Amino acid sequence: MPGTEPLDLQSIVDDIYRELTPRLGEGKVADYIPQLARVDPTRFGMAVVTVDGSVYRAGDAEMPFSIQSISKVFTLTLALGKHGENIWTRVGREPSGSAFNSIVQLEHEHGIPRNPFINAGAIAITDLVLAGHTPREAIGEIVRFVRYLADEEDIVIDAEVARSEAATGYRNFALANFMRSFGKLDHPVEHVLGVYFHQCALAMSCVQLAKAGLFLAASGSNPLTRHSVVSRQRARRINALMLTCGHYDGSGDFAYRVGLPGKSGVGGGILVAAPGKASVAVWSPGLNHNGNSLLGSLALEMLASRTGWSVFGG
Amino acid sequence: MPGTEPLDLQSIVDDIYRELTPRLGEGKVADYIPQLARVDPTRFGMAVVTVDGSVYRAGDAEMPFSIQSISKVFTLTLALGKHGENIWTRVGREPSGSAFNSIVQLEHEHGIPRNPFINAGAIAITDLVLAGHTPREAIGEIVRFVRYLADEEDIVIDAEVARSEAATGYRNFALANFMRSFGKLDHPVEHVLGVYFHQCALAMSCVQLAKAGLFLAASGSNPLTRHSVVSRQRARRINALMLTCGHYDGSGDFAYRVGLPGKSGVGGGILVAAPGKASVAVWSPGLNHNGNSLLGSLALEMLASRTGWSVFGG
Amino acid sequence: MPGTEPLDLQSIVDDIYRELTPRLGEGKVADYIPQLARVDPTRFGMAVVTVDGSVYRAGDAEMPFSIQSISKVFTLTLALGKHGENIWTRVGREPSGSAFNSIVQLEHEHGIPRNPFINAGAIAITDLVLAGHTPREAIGEIVRFVRYLADEEDIVIDAEVARSEAATGYRNFALANFMRSFGKLDHPVEHVLGVYFHQCALAMSCVQLAKAGLFLAASGSNPLTRHSVVSRQRARRINALMLTCGHYDGSGDFAYRVGLPGKSGVGGGILVAAPGKASVAVWSPGLNHNGNSLLGSLALEMLASRTGWSVFGG
Amino acid sequence: MPGTEPLDLQSIVDDIYRELTPRLGEGKVADYIPQLARVDPTRFGMAVVTVDGSVYRAGDAEMPFSIQSISKVFTLTLALGKHGENIWTRVGREPSGSAFNSIVQLEHEHGIPRNPFINAGAIAITDLVLAGHTPREAIGEIVRFVRYLADEEDIVIDAEVARSEAATGYRNFALANFMRSFGKLDHPVEHVLGVYFHQCALAMSCVQLAKAGLFLAASGSNPLTRHSVVSRQRARRINALMLTCGHYDGSGDFAYRVGLPGKSGVGGGILVAAPGKASVAVWSPGLNHNGNSLLGSLALEMLASRTGWSVFGG
């Protein structure tokens, strides 16, 4: 029974990795830029960092990968710090009911994206992070913030990935121009997307990512560094957004199967918070039809089931 | 600080009631049938039933009202009991991103409603509850199930409300015929809607409702009756669905502000589960623009804030 | 060169029939009711009735078939006669940009169908034809009107087709209930659809159909009977509606390729007006992906090309 | 009765101008760029050029205005000349059922615009006109083609309008990037839109415009210059597209009321072809809710009614 005796987390993550090994390579690797398509599809990493500071690893847990949309959690946290609840005049907080890069909803709702975790919403958030900054400064601020969260100074942006996204990101240019046509971006499209493509190109390992997200599992403070990142209430609210909106049009399914707040990226990573317990990151490049890591989601479902971690009841 | 000392729940609910009293009557009472429009808009009830069996009341907590869509939680539980996870071939589990009675999504997804808590999805669930039954039997089963959950024998259906909904429920007839046109209902439209209109017409008080939902806060078992209703995992999953889909196109906002799984009805009621803590029901007839109780949502936000109850972290 | 010497219309229709004979059976026969699915897919009929009263036939030009949506031209003409331009408060006159039975647009436009030739719009028109009548009387009026137009007393409704449509017409029940939910139908859904299913079940031959539509090619009067049916202006306007909306989401393509106003039905018939020249009806049961007769459209394109008939210039 | 005696066209256009004079200034002038907003809203011009070469003028018929989307007719004609019917792999020919600059449909149809007369479709056409050219060359070709059509050497592009559109055309950048994301543009977005903004900035008077469109009323040849522009069939087909798609989501209404193929622009101009009779241009800056000239549409309805000109029957 969950909770009644100490969990052997290392055994649990080892078991999950071993059980999934025969399936490595399943799913479809994102291929819209060559840098993502080149990744070895059989990579798999998992890291669990508990609120008391223990770290459990499996597979390629120390290998950096492109965090892509997981960065939206960090820029949202930054924007909330800068602008507080005023950000909700520029972006909603409802699940989208459609694909991550849909433009349809934007038209119906006059340039206000449904939530900060779809592309349009994250672009609106990046526009807010840019306030008072040059693009270069904003990129610097984002990198420093992630390093501070993870307490890891060697986290960097993969410049080649950022360049490649800029060269082919027509859909994001369409979204940003569309929002600009409704007067919903303050900065030039090129500046906003310049920052956005760089944040998506952050390269982090599972261990780094789990550490960076630990404040969400620990009421807003990072127990490793004793830094207070956000208030208790704000940590809850970011978790609420991850739970309802963190997996594009698979958010309901993830909540049903895993029962924990999380955010996925097309690089195959997922960051999850088990409040009061641990921060978890997985990485497996093959995606399901909603654009979320196929084996990553499965690994998290196994972890939640075996640990009893769920926000929905003991 | 939440959790560090015993909560005085009676004072908390009394305070909430007193603080909201000047605002009673705000919002727009549902008026699509005369029986709902006739309700006194200044009614307000609240009941908290903790997992150890204590009951706290404020206002009109013992006055029955039309639970309407809150009934969808009970029929979903029944359908899961009958058909298990097979129900997901007939209904999805993703937030809808649109109004409670939208038909647009049904066309795009070929007659499969997005989740069991929008009208189309609840009609699909009722169709499953009907399996092997006449409409009269199915209605009887639903009433008996709710009485069993609440341990209250005097819960009844308001027949006049049911008749009135049947006489004017053109939108629901449209939804049901539309699903039938895709072959996604097994029973005649008239049978399915006959049952559906009756389940929506269940009249319950806040206390009755909070008791009936207590199993969701208590890992699947009702601590008052010691009845096991569903498994621990199923209780979690129903909570997950309530959190992501329980408030129509205001589900994300409710999760953000309140942080607890809940289900609203156009009668002005909301049922909420605080896992491990309590089951809560509120009633205030005035609705916000998403069709959820305006003051009821606010009362729950106040309760969550003052108790520290949240699924998203301590 | 078109127009410079008398056309040998009999040779032209004979040639078209002969050239299409190898392809008879192409396309997909409508199968949503057994009575339509049972039709021989290799049937082909064509009739041209010129404004001076000559009749040219090919193939099964005298064999009755289910005219289905072509009836919408006749009920529109009746409704305009009864209510004049007031009908445009209940139905628009813009192309729909979507399928013949789409419900999406109805939601966006609050129960006002885009035009009288999609199902929802035709149902709204039938509701107007019902004004002051029982369903039985309205059906009688429609049949008498079509007989009067064609000057043929033996045109009848296929009662079995009407019954079958009523038993399976869930999509139309959905559309009608949806409009009723917006208060956009005056009569009970069952009455309106009772009439609608009967009008669609009219059985007519190509010759009868071409005669019935002759007033549209002849400035509003039937040169065979010398009856004045509608004003010159109204004939033009009905032609305009057929040109922009007569072929569901293939209306633009039909205008481009054929260049004449027409209305198709899922029974495989198409009625076309060549103003000042002739009324034309074709019948071939196999449909294209837009639900219009595949070979029927092709036959009309051949006819228009060989006669030089086009509303868009000599 | 129309057609039985010679029309006094000068009296007709004079009467229309006089009768509309009290209403000059009605409608809403396009204001998305300052250059359009600055126009005097009470301007009104009208020109009728008959197929035998007579020119009738009223009001500001010789004053140049920004033809905007009317240019789409000329680039479509150019693209058909270069690529023939192959253009239909890049753009459809169905009415859109939505606003002139909607992006929703593009997503549903994977980057293929519905027709060449909505913005997205015109951008696709401009991409085809660019084939083998630099943007500068393509702009030159378009200007030369329009001069050739109108036989007027002093037609020019208003460079300030073009620059201003480029600086604020976020919606068009969104549309073009969106199409590019589906691989449906061959040239860089900046090149395509550079040409597009210039073609829209062509400044022409009603007389010049009517002359330039005369080939559409005269079976493809310009009777003034005796130049053959397109084949008889192609002239018909362009007319068909104008009739079904020429007025955005008001195309059906224009066909119903006016009964002639036409194309409008947000500068307040409308070009119309009365096949076999005349080419007509009107200009009145105030727009209706569909973005078409309010008084311009009305003037054409009056003209059609008084001349009896209609493609839908004598």
Image: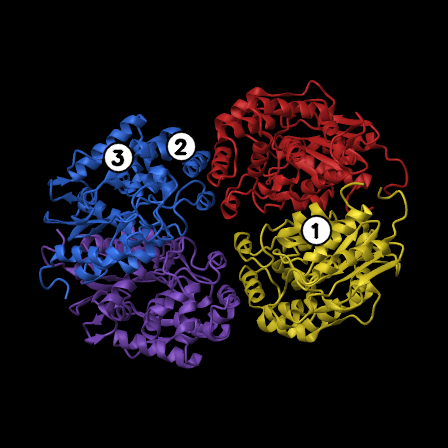
Chain colours: A purple, B blue, C red, D yellow
Q: Position of residue C281 (x, y in %)?
A: 72, 31
- How crowded pointer 3 is (Cα within 10 Å; few <14, some 14-19, many 20+) is rated as some
Whether residue C10 can be seen here? yes
Q: Is residue A17 visible?
A: no
Which element is circle 3 on?
helix
Image quadrant where one finds the N terminus of chain C: top right
Discs 2/3, front: 2
- Is residue B124 or residue A292 the one in the foreground? B124
Q: Report the side of C280 relative to A11 (left or right).
A: right
Crowding at dot 2, Cα within 10 Å, few <14 / some 14-19 / many 20+, comes out as: few
Q: Position of residue C94 (x, y in %)?
A: 62, 46
What chain does badge 3 belong to? B
Q: Secondary structure at mark 2?
A: helix
- B29 and C153: which is toward the camera: B29
Instruction: Say which residue label 1 marks.
Output: D241
Kind of residue sitting beneath label 3: Lys
